[in-house]
Amino acid sequence: MNPKPGEVWLVDLGLAAKMRPVLIVSRADPNPPRALVVYVPLTSQNRGSPYEVVLPKLPFLNRDSVANVQGLGSVPTVRLERKLDSLPEEIMLQVKVAISNARSVHSCQSTQFPCPSALGCFDDQLLSVQQVLTCFNYRLLTYRASPIRSLIF
């Protein structure tokens, strides 16, 4: 089993003895060092938080749902029960931006990979998609040249 980024799976998270839908956000890795995936839980409890991405009506989810990026976690692949479907690319981009903002991955002042575009980012600033993509593209170039590998993006 090799789940891919953007796929939605039902998972046993050990909560309330029922299966929960999660969005896989781990990088695609054909030979992962551990049998773990990084996920964002999907929930029907929309609190209107900047850490939530509202999902469009999806045929494989029976309720209106959000991706709660504050619940970012990892789970062994053996706990993945069933693949439901994949999210559209534009929704995945929104989730990546929300993760970046929640985790301050974008922050030029707090990261070892400073953003080359001198965005003047601050930890408490929510960034636009374009700003995050600028940082993200720089990280891809740095990633390819670095022995340190990021799990997300």
Image (spheres, grey):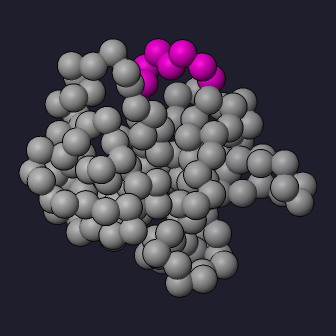
For image coordinates 68% across by 38% down, the residue present is 75
Is 30 in the magenta? yes
- Residue 38 against residue 104 in the figure, above or below: above
Residue 98, by quadrant, is bottom left
The location of residue 138, given as percent across then percent down, is 17, 40
Q: Quadrant of residue 119?
A: bottom left
Residue at the extreme left of the image, as rendered: 117
Quadrant (top left, top right, bottom left, bottom right) of the C terminus = top left
In the rendered image of this protein, does residue 109 appear above or below residue 38? below
Question: The magenta stretch spans which residues?
Answer: 28-35
Q: In the image, residue 113 lies at what x, y percent?
A: 26, 37
Quadrant housing the N terminus: top right
Q: Nearer the viewer, residue 106 or 43?
A: 106
Is residue 107 placed above or below 32 in the rendered structure?
below
The residue drawn where x is 47% and y is 45% is 25
Q: Measuring 12% from the left and 44% from the top, which residue is drawn there? A: 116
Examine the residues drawn in magenta and state their main secondary structure. Answer: loop
Q: Nearer the viewer, residue 5 or 110?
A: 110
| Left or right: residue 149 compared with residue 79 | left
Q: Is residue 25 left or right of residue 73?
A: left
Whole-percent x, y for residue 103 in the image: 46, 54
Q: Residue 39 lies in magenta, yes or no?
A: no
